[in-house]
Amino acid sequence: MTEADPMINLPGDGIPVAPSMEGALENARIPSVGAVIDGRVATISLLAMGLGLAVGFIAEFLMRLIGLVTNLAFHHRFSMEFASPVGHHLGGWVVFVPVLGGLLVGLMARYGSVAIRGHGIPEAMEQVLLNQSRIPARITILKPLSAAIAIGTGGPFGAEGPIIATGGALGSLVGQFIPTTNLERKTLLAAGAAAGMAATFGSPVSAVLLAVELLLFEMRPRSIIPVALAAVVATGVRFSLVGIKPIFPMSTLATPNGISLGAYIMVGALIGVISVFVTKSVYWIEDAFEHLPIHWMWWPAMGGLAVGAIGYFVPHTLGVGYDNIQSILSSDLMGTTLLVLCLAKFASWSIALGSGTSGGTLAPLFTIGGALGAIMGGGFAKLLPHAGVDPRMCALVGMAAIFAGAS
């Protein structure tokens, strides 16, 4: 602000600013509480709670659908229990299972909707920023179906991304059927997305923070309240269906001291740097597929060939891999085994995602970051045996750092 700038007041706030700053502060004005907590917010909140209820059941249905496809594709049995591809008896034929899944996803993308490609969150962000939070209705059906096929046939993805995308699409759909403003529609989209994450992990607080950072871009009561209510309701649905136990249970961790805190900070910083490499690698692979002289419909099948080949040698790279994350956090995997899983999962996931198939990134990133953190933690524990560095805590730090850096 210069001395030549006369002072003005923001309407309803009484905060003096200069005209040169008025445009920059337009979105930062803080209206009175009565201006944001009104009957309309209550209406949107009720809709958001309904979304949370619906998305909670949709999340459970998608997990069971993934289980059904996995059991049919790898174990030749009809069951909707969530299962891992590990333990199959297909031998070399396992290479072609992800190829078939990729082919089906490619056909769905070409003749259904191209928006099912990818892991969902960037596509939701694009609709928020460029299309007034309007997501086509068919995405609500095609996204979970394509994700179930891709993951169930061995795709190295998490279910959370498609569930988040499906919840966001459902929220946007409600906002299109009911007269709403762009802001209200964005709030409903974010509420559905947050409900999807909360229903997957039973983590309402982190779900709200994710929605704020990636979809809402604001911390105002008019949007936070509906999103928080949707996340809480979805968490309640999850608890009623699968219980209250954490998705990744852990034994008690020791309180860190000064030296171990320094080690954890170093692990986070190093993996933050690695997350840049991870992001650039996926973009590079996407660009490489763009230069192929064949239609993009066939790319997921080509990515599936790489997934199947890697999965033949390292079966634990196939599928969601929540069991891998649990093993990492329990220190059941160590040394060379952990390093092989980390590198193989990264190669499989990055190629598959770069090919444009449908699936989430959170679980693969947790696997990669957790493995890297545990490896570093093991190294610190050997170099500084009396420092109290816990590889399990390093794995947690790695999971958080790689997702924060890559997202």
Image: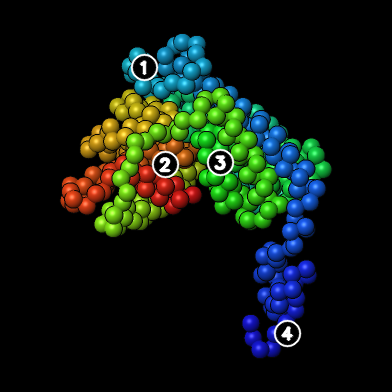
Disc nearest the viewer among 1 and 2:
2
Quadrant position of residue 173: top right
Asked if disc 2 and disc 4 are in contact, CB closer than 8 Å, the reply is no
- Closer to the eye: label 3 or 1: 3
Q: Is residue 207 visible?
A: yes
Q: Which mark is residue 204?
A: 3
- The residues tagged by marks 3 and 2 sit, at their Cα atoms, a distance apart of 20 Å
Q: Position of residue 206 (x, y in %)?
A: 52, 45
The answer, for residue 108, to whether it is visible in the render is no
Q: Work out which quarter of the rendered image holds the N terminus and state it.
A: bottom right
Residue 117 left/right relative to 263: right
**Residue 185: x %, y % from top left:** 73, 45
Nearest to N terminus: mark 1 or mark 4: 4
| Residue 6 numbered mark, or none | 4
Real-space CA distance between mark 3 and mark 1, rounded to the nearest whole angstrom: 35 Å
Q: Position of residue 327 (x, y in %)?
A: 33, 32
Say which residue appears at 52% left-offset and 35% top-offset. Answer: 202
Name the amino acid type tagged 1: His
Label 3 or label 4, whichever lies nearer to me, is 3
Name the amino acid, label 4. Pro
Compare residues 210 and 77 and report the one nearer the observer: 210
Task: Report the Cα–Cα distance between label 2 and label 4.
Answer: 51 Å
Is 350 located above or below residue 221 in the figure? above
Does dot 3 land on a helix, a strand or a loop? helix
Say which mark, if any, is on residue 88.
1
Q: Compare marks 1 and 2 and give the one earlier in the sequence.
A: 1
Mark nearer the viewer, 2 or 4: 4
